[in-house]
Image: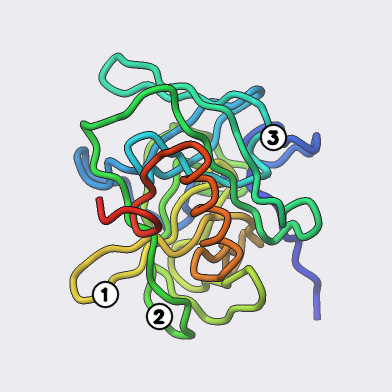
Amino acid sequence: MKAKAVWFLIWCRAVAGWEVDSRVINGTIVPEGQYPEMILITTEKSWCSSTLIGPRVILTAAHCARVGSEISYTHQGITYRGIVAHSPRYAIDYSHDIAVAAMDQENRDIKPATVGGKAFSNTPAQLLGFGCTAQGGGYDKKLRVGNTRITSYSGYYMYLRGGGIACPGDSGGAAFVSDNGERYLLGVTSRTDFQSGSYSTRLDVGESESFLRSFGAKHNVDICGINSNC
């Protein structure tokens, strides 16, 4: 069997110094006004996808930005800034690839995503991000969505296969699932093999919930689905 390369999904220059490129392969452009909780953030050296999960809280991939570094985004002429905190598990297990930042002010114009759902095999999901549409392709920083399916899961990762595939730039983006007509944020985009599927860090495991709950308490911020119904 031919081995497939699996990449973390940072655009241009990763924190570790790798050069890779992340739009949703096989995805479609999201119409304006849909998924407003998806945020394109600026990091120290590049940019990443992220999700607003509370009026002041941004969730992204840990490999997108160093601990203690600043991220920012601009919405309706207002720039929001925050300092990155990694999951403590990331230092010993890169598959727990999640990070958050408490921004310097609330964004009340956007309804945040709600963290929730469970990772079950054969569950339909939607993958969203601002990355490339083909390996080595260009970037227009437009939000795209691709339909996919959870085919397996192990530890902190769930594997999504078929349809939309993450592509560098999509790092930190969202894997959404639906339950009774409601949309829930179940995963954070971490890696891709460019050909058949993507890896997302699960938010339905105890370590993810504990990290988010502790962060919310420490910074006195609401996180939808964790410490607030938003």
- Label of residue 71 in the image: none
Pick whichever of labels 2 and 1 is earlier in the sequence.
2
Q: Secondary structure at mark 2?
A: strand
Circle 3 or circle 2, nearest the eye: 3
Q: Is residue 126 visible to us here?
A: no
- Label of residue 179 in the image: 1
Q: CA distance from mark 1 to mark 3?
A: 34 Å
Query: Residue 16's spot in the image, x, y percent?
Result: 80, 38
Query: Residue 195's spot in the image, x, y percent?
Result: 61, 64
Pick whichever of labels 3 and 2 is earlier in the sequence.
3
Classify mark 2: residues with Cα within 10 Å, few (<14), some (14-19) or many (20+).
some
- What colour scheme governs how the chains and residues are painted in the rendered image of this protein? rainbow
Classify mark 3: residues with Cα within 10 Å, few (<14), some (14-19) or many (20+).
some
Q: CA distance from mark 3 to mark 2?
A: 33 Å
Circle 2 or circle 1, nearest the eye: 1
Q: Which residue is mark 3?
A: 67
Q: Is residue 116 visible to us here?
A: yes
- Label of residue 123 in the image: 2
> Could you tell me which residue is drawn at 40 percent across and 80 percent down?
123
Q: Amino acid at mark 2?
A: Thr
Image quarter where the N terminus lies is bottom right
Query: Residue 12's spot in the image, x, y percent?
Result: 66, 32
How many labels sit on residues?
A: 3
Query: Is residue 15 found left or right of 116 in the rendered image?
Result: right
Query: Is residue 21 found left or right of 118 in the rendered image?
Result: right
- Determine which quarter of the picture holds residue 5: bottom right
Q: Secondary structure at mark 1?
A: strand
Query: Residue 28's spot in the image, x, y percent?
Result: 33, 52
